[in-house]
Image (cartoon, rainbow, N blue to C red):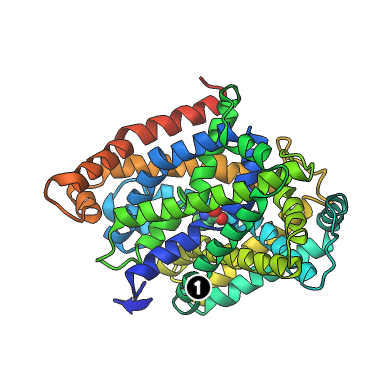
Amino acid sequence: MTSQNNRAQFVTRMGAIATAVGSAVGLGNIWRFPYEAGTHGGGAFMLCYIFFIIILGIPVLCAEFAIGRATRANEIKAFEKLAPKTKWYFAGYIGVLASILILSFYSVVAGWTMEFFLSSLIGSLPADTAHLHSHFDSFISGDTRPLIWTLVFLAVNFIVLSRGVEKGIEKVSNIMMPMMFVLLIVFCFNSLLLPGASEGLAFLFRPDFSMIDSRTLLSAMGQAFFSLSLGLGCMLTYGSYFPDKTKLGRSAATTALLDTTVAILAGIIIFPAVFAYGISPQAGPTLVFETLPAIFINMPGGIVWAPLFFFLLFLASITSTISMSEISIAWLTEELKLSRKKATSVTIATAMVLGSLCALSFGSLSGFKIAGLTVFDLFDYLSSNILLPVGGMLVSIFAGWVMDRKLLRRQLSSDSGGGKKARMLGLVIFLLKWVAPIAIGLILLDSVGVI
Ligand code: PFF
């Protein structure tokens, strides 16, 4: 990134896409997608998820990029600039709130990856699934270690963030993403050779339509937003750093394609193993951490795979947490005029307090429930299934109905004449104007039992 008019910008087009992909690809793909798919019927969930990525994810991603780059501002200022003297900026505050909630529970899981990295490196992970289950159970319910790892992970974020996004992130994303891909492909081949392969693949790819109910729809929609970092202004903020020459439509499609590919690869890795090792697909948030080590340990050269993978997963997490922290940091520095260091401290300190509560949700706070959910589950549910879809709905209404149409077209079009690209643009605008608000609205109303 470079600084222009006191505002940072990504240097290259490639760097811009790599950071967007870096934000999108993370624990959402490798940890959250498999467990959500596992608890919501496998194939049925997968089908709804891909459908939502196409009809909601890509259009809202285009809209966030366009609003960000058109205004070159943090999300609250962006709404103020495009719709002065209205209350639209309020959508920005929803985003800031969602980003803090996600940062808090996400850091707990990122902390688990650090624990697994270390224990696989020193060879202290048990080799069979039964022991893995009890090993992981006693780790997360033990309070101290999960808590320490959460705080360590957030402290690492603080160090990277307070030095400015420009130095590390672009470079890390450029190297890590291709490595992650290669590793996932290797693991896929390995899983396809497991005795549970055909059962696992059938679970993931053969939809049982009777499983599609309002809960599946809500979770798949929430997962689509979560995975693409949408609905909270993260991609809007990154869009505000994009160079003028970046093609937004193409970047959105590339980001969605790569992100979805990683999630599907993760599913292809996890589910054959789930069936091969007799793990329940409905294990929930702990699913991946109980399945993956079993796969690695049984692979030739197992000692290398596990630490390598958990290290990459840690990097993938940090490129995501940095992007979500950037939302409130951009707001605190540009609106409340805090220094970058102060803004970072406030953001990370808040996440440390809330993250501690999430870390303890599996241990001494496991009995503390609000609306039947632990703090960890509540933050996850509230942000992914409510705040992100509401944010996504507001962004699509804003882009479709409020934002100056010429400005939106100018941001999104790479060829302003007729032709295929112009037709795609027409489709994106149609989806933003009609399909996204109505679909999101109906699913949200359905989930609270109004319709
Ligand atoms: N998209 C990230 C993932 O799938 O891991 C999570 C995420 C990042 C959500 C940034 C929200 C956000 F602003």
**Element class at badge 1:** helix
Q: Which residue is mark 1?
A: 175
Q: Quadrant of the N terminus?
A: bottom left
In the image, 19 versus 191, the foreground residue is 191
In the rendered view, would you say 93 is above or below 304? above
What is the x, y in percent for residue 325? 53, 63
- The residue under label 1 is which amino acid type? Ile
**Residue 204 visible within the image:** yes
377 and 250: which is toward the camera? 250
Q: How many marks?
A: 1
- Is 141 positioned to the left or the right of 378 in the image? right
Residue placed at 63% from the left, 41% from the top?
36
Percent position of residue 6, x then y: 33, 77
Residue reaching furthest left? 417
Where residue 122 appears, as percent x and y from the top left, is 81, 73
Residue 433 occupies quadrant: top left
Which residue lies at the image location 42% right of the left edge and 47% below the top edge? 91
Question: Residue 378: in sight, yes or no?
Answer: no
Q: In this rendering, would 49 be left or right of 157?
A: left
Name the foreground residue: 100 vs 132.
132
Splitting the image into 4 quarters, where does residue 201 fall?
top right
Residue at (43%, 51%) from the top-left corner?
257
- Residue 439 x %, y %: 42, 31
Number of residues whose C-alpha sits closer than 10 Å to that of mark 1, classed few (under 14), some (14–19) or many (20 or more)? few
Q: Which sits in the foreground, 370 or 184?
A: 184
Residue 175's place in the image compared with 104, above or below, is below
Label 1 CB, ligand 1: below 8 Å?
no
